[in-house]
Image (cartoon, rainbow, N blue to C red):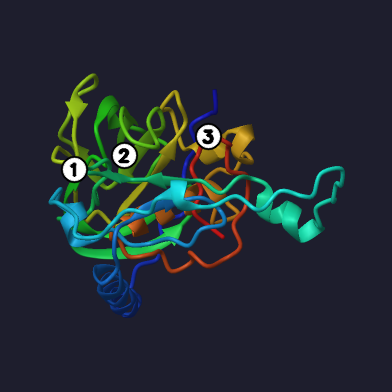
């Protein structure tokens, strides 16, 4: 079990930075609003954006991708065998698999920050940081595993829940820092459940993948590279969670394009190229 850590000094917040980030966020939202049906993709597939109908559980106007239509390559002539080139080996390993985050009539996952006022994307570290205030929802159907305070995080709030449906079923999500829990341990929640209220406490919130035990961020475990509050950032685990949020309509973090550190455990769906 990883030891709970104390985060590094609170992030600097100034009006100029917030205005610039808000402009970037606005552009990202305009782009995502025009995209079609969303899929939570693997390393060799580009990310699409979840349309507004999917976000709010309405019937989708777009057609989902049909993986069955992908035709296999023609077989080699009988009695011959050709070794794959290095480039072909890269393309073939791992297999290209599309994992949908929505289903007919209702999405598995919905933007959990859709009602936060003045939402400002900040950095990716162990998870993803945001400024703003207002209600935060569960990402999807889940069971609450922690709902209280964690002294190792600025602001003291600590909520974790284990997803019970969708491609990320079984994974644990955390919501930390400037947030007041509104749920209880053992409570079943849905994307319509407010799990905490974010307040302007100087640190904002951080959300991301938690360890299975729920004691801290997944990035601190050896399987993820053992990266704690001191960095280096962004972590691959944090970037993975940011990419999922972007697919749901959340503005991307300003350091989303930076080199990521650590490892991504095999049980996490991937979206980067």
Left or right of 264? Residue 86 is right
Q: Residue placed at 14% from the left, 55% from the top?
A: 115
The furthest residue to the top = 186
- The percent position of residue 210, horizontal first and vertical second, equals 43, 35
Q: Residue placed at 23% from the left, 53% from the top?
A: 113
Name the residue nearer the viewer: 48 or 248: 48
Say how many tags the image has: 3
The furthest residue to the front = 78
The quarter of the image holding the N terminus is top right
Element at label 1? strand
Please report whichever mark, 2 or 1, sits nearer to the chain's N-terminal start: 1
Left or right of 185? Residue 92 is right
Residue matched to label 2: 156
The quarter of the image holding the C terminus is bottom right
**Inter-mark Cα distance, 2 to 3:** 29 Å
- The percent position of residue 43, horizontal first and vertical second, equals 56, 53
Q: Residue placed at 52% from the left, 67% from the top?
A: 257
Element at label 3? loop
Q: In which quarter of the image is residue 173?
A: top left
Residue matched to label 3: 267
Please report whichever mark, 1 or 3, sits nearer to the chain's N-terminal start: 1
Q: Can residue 23 be seen in this view?
A: yes
Name the residue nearer the viewer: 13 or 175: 175
Q: Are marks 2 and 3 in contact (CB under 8 Å)?
A: no
Q: Residue placed at 47% from the left, 38% from the top?
A: 217
**Inter-mark Cα distance, 2 to 1:** 34 Å
Q: Single out the mark in the foreground, 1 or 3.
A: 1
**Inter-mark Cα distance, 1 to 3:** 24 Å
Q: Single out the mark in the foreground, 2 or 1.
A: 1
| Disc number placed over residue 106 in the picture, else none | 1
Q: Are marks 2 and 1 in contact (CB under 8 Å)?
A: no
Q: In which quarter of the image is residue 139?
A: top left
């Amino acid at each position: 079990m990883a030891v709970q850590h104390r985060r590094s000094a609170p992030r600097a917040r100034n009006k100029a930075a917030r205005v610039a980030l808000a402009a970037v966020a606005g552009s990202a939202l305009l782009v995502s609003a025009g995209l079609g049906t969303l899929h939570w993709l693997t390393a060799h597939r580009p990310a699409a954006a979840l349309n507004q109908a999917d976000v709010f559980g309405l019937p989708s106007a777009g057609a989902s991708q049909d993986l069955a239509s992908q035709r296999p390559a023609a077989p080699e002539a009988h009695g011959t065998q050709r070794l794959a080139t290095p480039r072909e080996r890269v393309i073939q390993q791992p297999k290209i698999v599309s994992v949908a985050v929505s289903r007919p009539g209702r999405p598995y996952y919905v933007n959990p920050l859709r009602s936060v006022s003045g939402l400002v994307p900040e950095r990716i570290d162990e998870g993803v940081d945001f400024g703003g205030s207002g209600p935060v929802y569960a990402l999807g159907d889940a069971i609450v595993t922690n709902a209280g305070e964690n002294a190792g995080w600025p602001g003291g709030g600590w909520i974790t829940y284990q997803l019970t449906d969708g491609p990320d079923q079984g994974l644990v999500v955390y919501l930390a820092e400037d947030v007041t829990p509104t749920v209880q341990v053992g409570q079943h929640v849905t994307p319509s459940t407010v799990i905490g209220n974010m307040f302007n406490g100087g640190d904002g919130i951080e959300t991301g993948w938690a360890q299975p035990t729920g004691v801290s961020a997944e990035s601190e475990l050896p399987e993820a590279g053992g990266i704690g509050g001191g960095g280096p950032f962004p972590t691959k685990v944090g970037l993975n969670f940011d990419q999922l949020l972007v697919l749901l309509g959340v503005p991307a973090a300003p350091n989303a394009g930076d080199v990521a550190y650590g490892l991504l455990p095999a049980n996490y769906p991937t979206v980067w190229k």
